[in-house]
Structures are given as structure tokens and as C-alpha cells.
Amino acid sequence: MSCLKGGKKKPLKQLKKQAKEMDEEGKAFKQKQKEEQKKLKELKAKAVGKGLRVTGCSGHVTPPSAPPPPHPHVLRHVLRHVLRHVLRHVLRHVLRHVLRTPVGRRSQGQSGALKSVFRSPKSPYQRLSQWMLDISGDQGVLKDVIREGAGELVMPDASVLVKYSGYLEHMDKPFDSNCFRKTPRLMKLGVDITLYGMELGLLTMRRGELARFLFKPPYAYGTLGCPPLIPPNSTVLFEIELIDFLDSAESDKFCALTAEQQDQFPLQKVLKVAATEREFGNYLFRQNRFYDAKVRYKRALLLLCRRSAPPEEQHLVEAAKLLVLLNLSFTYLKLEHPTRALHYGEQALIIDQKNAKALFRCGQACLLMTEYQKARDFLVRAQKEQPFNHDINNELKKLASGEFQPPDVTSYKDRPSLTTVYFTLQHYRDYTDKEKEMCHRMFAPCDNGSTIGEK
């Protein structure tokens, strides 16, 4: 029993003793940990005070790295904000100082400072003029090429075909423009163009060129301007596109000479002048100015008919005459003069008997003159030369089907009697009935494999 009691008491005392020792060790460890944390805090405080960076739990101190650069947008925004704030502050201070100071007591230095603060920037035209080429020599006409052209420069006294738009400063809409026209008007330099600056600018351009010009008041509308559209002393901007030009001055001077003087020039000169007149007529024809086109064509024909050429160069004259005669025939058809159209068409056939265009023009003229058999002969000959020509085949089909109507006889000056009109219409009906039957067989499809014309 004693052994058992002794064995129980001894382990309990040891446990208590060990527990007490462990408590003391724990307190000592906590005290030591508190001291270390205190030292670490002191080290961190010293490092932060010196601008160093502390990393990790151990308090390792590393030198600070360079901060990343700010984003450009952020920097721009900050600078804009700072400048706006500074300028607002400066302007407020200057205005307050000026308003508080009487006018008589303001010094020249204050006035100069005020002018420098409120000095206006350069205008848009002034900034644009810095990059433009001076073509007048006194900064009066400035040019900026937008699209390059090709060929020769515009000749003095030439007739030009241009598209243009004129703008005033600080305005988006043009005060003058011809770009809305389908076919711009042909203008002659020195006659139809009133702006001296535009004439100087056009003389520096080539075909197809697009350029921008600045005209100072002496080269535009002067000191008075053109009220109320153009203010006084206005600098104007023009955008000009040179579509084409004709050297009509040379042809005008040549046509003003006598026949003896014209004979002294070589044949190539005559052909060139005649070609210029024909091109002039073509342009007028495209503008539906048929009478003016006829005048130009006749001038070209007169030059070619009046000039004699050696046999080896006669074909050049005949080729030029053929083009003019065809144009004259077509122009007279547009002017509703079928007799003259037939005359010039037959003159063209004398030069080239198989010319399909001349045969077609003669056929059209005969149709307007109600000479249907003669018209059919011309059209069939034209179809023989060009079987797949759409216009020729359409006229033949209209003539065969009776769709072609005779012209209004009341439009002629010499109105025929009712009897003449009746017999004319009756003859037209009889003719169309015969042509219907014949052309129906001509244009009918061959279903059974038979040839055209076989029953």
C-alpha cells in the first residue's frame, strides 16, 4: 500500500513543477517577442523616415525603386487643368488690376501688357498661306496643288472649261460655284473671267489639275468688295479644277486673216486650226447649243475647202472634212432642217461611199422628209456596213412595223392643204403595209430550218 501511495504522489508533484516551469518559459518567450516587435517597429520607423522601403516580415530594408511614368493622357489632362487654372488666375488678376486703375493713370507698359495678353491668334487664311506658293511675286496670289495635272500649261487667251468654288474666310458654304452644273460653261481668258487672280492662277495649271488659291483684295474684289455678298478688303479662297482648255486664240486670229494670208501658212497649221474649231463645236453641241456649234463647224469646213493640198497630203484634208460634214449633218437634224442634213450627209458619202454613219444620217433625214423608200435604201446600206448596229436596226424595225410617225406638217411655214395631207398620210399607210409584210418575213425566226426569205 505504501508503495502505491508513494507512486501516486510523486508524479503529481513533478507535473505541477513542470507546468510551473512551462509557464515561466512562456512568459519569458512572450516578453522576448514583445521586445523584438518593439525593436522592429523602431527599425521600420527609422527606415520610413529615411525614405527606404521595408519588405517581408523580417523587416528587410531595400532602397526605393523609381516610380512608373504617368500615362500620356493623364499627364496631358493634368497639364491642361494646371494651365487652365493658371491662365484663369492671371486673367482675373489682370482684369481686376485694369478695372481698378483709372484710364488716365495707365502707363504704356500696362497697355502693352494688356495688348500682349489679348492679342488674337493668326486667322485660318494666314496659317494656310504659310504653306502655299507665291505665283504673283507680291503674296497676292498663292497656290496649293491638290492634284497634279498633265500636258501643257494653259495658253493666254485660251478658252477654259473649269469647275470652281469661292469661299470667304470663316465660312463653310461657297459664295460662288459652278460645280452644280452638269456641263460648265466654256470661258475665254480676258473676256469671260473678271478676277485677275483667277486668270493668273489658270495660266499655271494643266489639264486635270485641282488646286487651291488665295486671292488678296487687289487680285479679287478690291477694297470695296461686292456688297452685300463680298465685304470690303476680303481675301477669298478658290478651289479650281481645270477640266480642259482650247487654244481658241490661235484659231480666232487665223480665221481673221484673208485667204491669201492663210495660204502662206503650212497645211499642218490649217489642219490644227480646223481641228480646234471642230472641238469647239463639239463642246457647244454637248451643251445643246446647236446653232453656235453649226457656226464653228462651218468655219472649220470653210478652212478645209478653201485650202488646196498636194496629192500626197490630200487624204489628210479629206479625212478632216469627213468628220466636219458628219457633225454638220447631225447638227442640222437637231435643228430640224432635214434638207440641209441630207445635203451634208451626201457630201460625206462623196468622200466615203461606205461610211455607215453618213448613210444613217441620210436615212434619218429622209424619214423626216417622209421619203420612206429613199430612207429605207440608206438604212439598208448602213446595215450592210454595220449589221449589228443597234440604232440602224431600230430605225429599220420602226420603219417596217409602222411605228415611225410622219412629222407634224403644221410645224412647217408652208402649210399644205388638207387634200395634200390626206394623200400624204394615205401614201404613208400604203407604204407601211407593204413594208410590214416584207420585213416580217425578213426578221421572222427560222423555226423549221429554212433560210430567210423562203416560204
Image: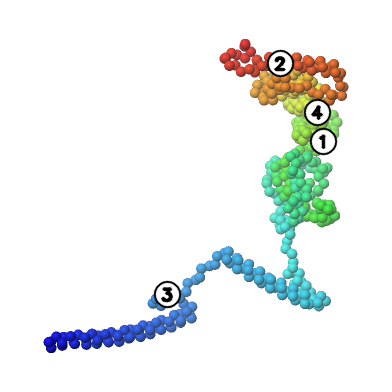
Q: Residues within 10 Å of mark 3 (few under 14, many from 20)?
A: few
Q: Earlier in the sequence, mark 4 or mark 2?
A: 4
Q: Which mark is residue 403?
A: none
Label 2 belongs to which residue? 435
Which residue is under mark 3?
55
Element carrying mark 3: strand
Q: CA distance from mark 1 to mark 4?
A: 25 Å
The numbered mark at residue 252 is 1
Residue contact between numbered discs 3 and 4, judged by CB atoms under 8 Å: no
Labelled pair 1, 4 in contact (Cβ < 8 Å): no
In space, the residues marked 3 and 1 are separated at their CA atoms by 97 Å
Q: Position of residue 301 (x, y in %)?
A: 79, 27
Q: CA distance from mark 4 to mark 2?
A: 29 Å
Type of residue at label 3? Answer: Thr
Q: Which mark is residue 335?
A: 4
Report helix, strand or loop for mark 4: loop
Taking depth in this image into account, of 226 and 125 the one nearest to the observer is: 226
Query: Which of the marked residues, 3 or 4, is nearer the chain's N terminus?
Result: 3
Query: Which quadrant would the C terminus be assigned to in this image?
Result: top right
Question: Which comes sooner in the sequence, label 1 or label 4?
Answer: 1
SS class of the residue under badge 1? helix
Name the amino acid, label 2. Glu
Which residue is located at x 48 percent, y 81 percent? 49
Neighbor class of circle 4 (other Cα within 10 Å; few <14, some 14-19, many 20+) is some
Q: Amino acid under label 1? A: Asp
